[in-house]
Image (cartoon, rainbow, N blue to C red):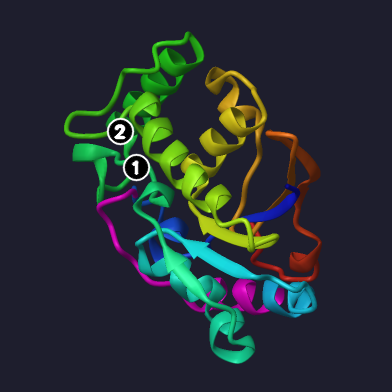
Amino acid sequence: MKKTFYFIRHGQTDLNLKGIVQGRGVNTSLNENGRKQADAFFNAYKHIPFDKIYTSTLVRTHQTIERFELELGIPKEQLAGLDEISWGIYEGQVQDETIMKGFEQLVSSWRNNDLDVHIENGESPNQLVKRQKEAVDYMLSKKEERTVLVCMHGRALRIMLCHLTDTPVTMMDDFPHTNTSLYVLEYENKKFKIIDHYNTAHLEGLEWEK
């Protein structure tokens, strides 16, 4: 069985723009820039014959792909396994000096293979990987869906790309991302392979693309 997965991060939100911590527990909408990014992605990839769209349970992913669903009639399903990592007590907070220092310590721990470490009331990479693998197994079980669009979140996408490609999760920050950036992966013989790495061509000419 061969399948092709188009993984994108959601469009920009005001909290992205303001440097406020989002996460699994913050359900924000796209801002004007985010909708323009979503439109740019739609216009660049509406010719792809997607059999199915999968999103997280959070509205910013739903809004990013809604034109594929509403205008092209592509069926959509949301999976909790695609939700962003939970940042616990940091969610909804401005990234001030204290929080930035906490993030630096956390990311340093993850690079050192302490993948059970998490923010208070938050989620660790190992916990995230567990629910992501359940989502991936579910998507792979749908053998009739050969070309799939998956819209999810920045940190979650980085971690997803690691375990799909047998890359140590400690290397998650080696995968760049920005709003609506694209990774295309082929699945065949029980292996995933990246065939398009961090494609942002659809964002060219957008002055606010970050």
Residue at left offset 55%, top offset 73%: 65
Indicate the amino acid at tag 1.
Gln
Give the label on residue 99, or none: 2
Q: 157 or 150, which is in the foreground? A: 150
Residue 11 visible (yes or no):
no
Q: Secondary structure at mark 1?
A: loop
Q: Would you say 75 lies left or right of 1 here?
A: left
Give the label on residue 137, or none: none
Which residues, given as a range, are shown in magenta? Answer: 23-40
Against 151, is 81 above or below?
A: above
Residue 27 lies in the magenta stretch: yes
Indicate the amino acid at tag 2.
Ile
Residue 56 lies in the magenta stretch: no
Q: Judge the density around disc 2: few (<14), some (14-19), many (≥20) Cα neighbours within 10 Å.
A: some
Q: Position of residue 137 (x, y in %)?
A: 50, 43
Q: Position of residue 106 (x, y in %)?
A: 37, 21
In contact (CB < 8 Å): disc 1 and disc 2:
yes
Q: CA distance from mark 1 to mark 2?
A: 5 Å
Q: Secondary structure at mark 2?
A: helix
Residue at left offset 41%, top offset 13%: 109
Q: Judge the density around disc 1: few (<14), some (14-19), many (≥20) Cα neighbours within 10 Å.
A: some
Against 49, is 8 above or below?
A: above
Q: Position of residue 180 (x, y in %)?
A: 62, 61
Residue at left offset 70%, top offset 60%: 146
Q: Would you say 113 lies left or right of 193 here?
A: left
Q: 118 or 209, which is in the foreground? A: 118
Can you name the residue that lies furthest to the bottom here? Answer: 71
Q: Which residue is mark 1?
A: 95
Q: Position of residue 5 (x, y in %)?
A: 68, 53
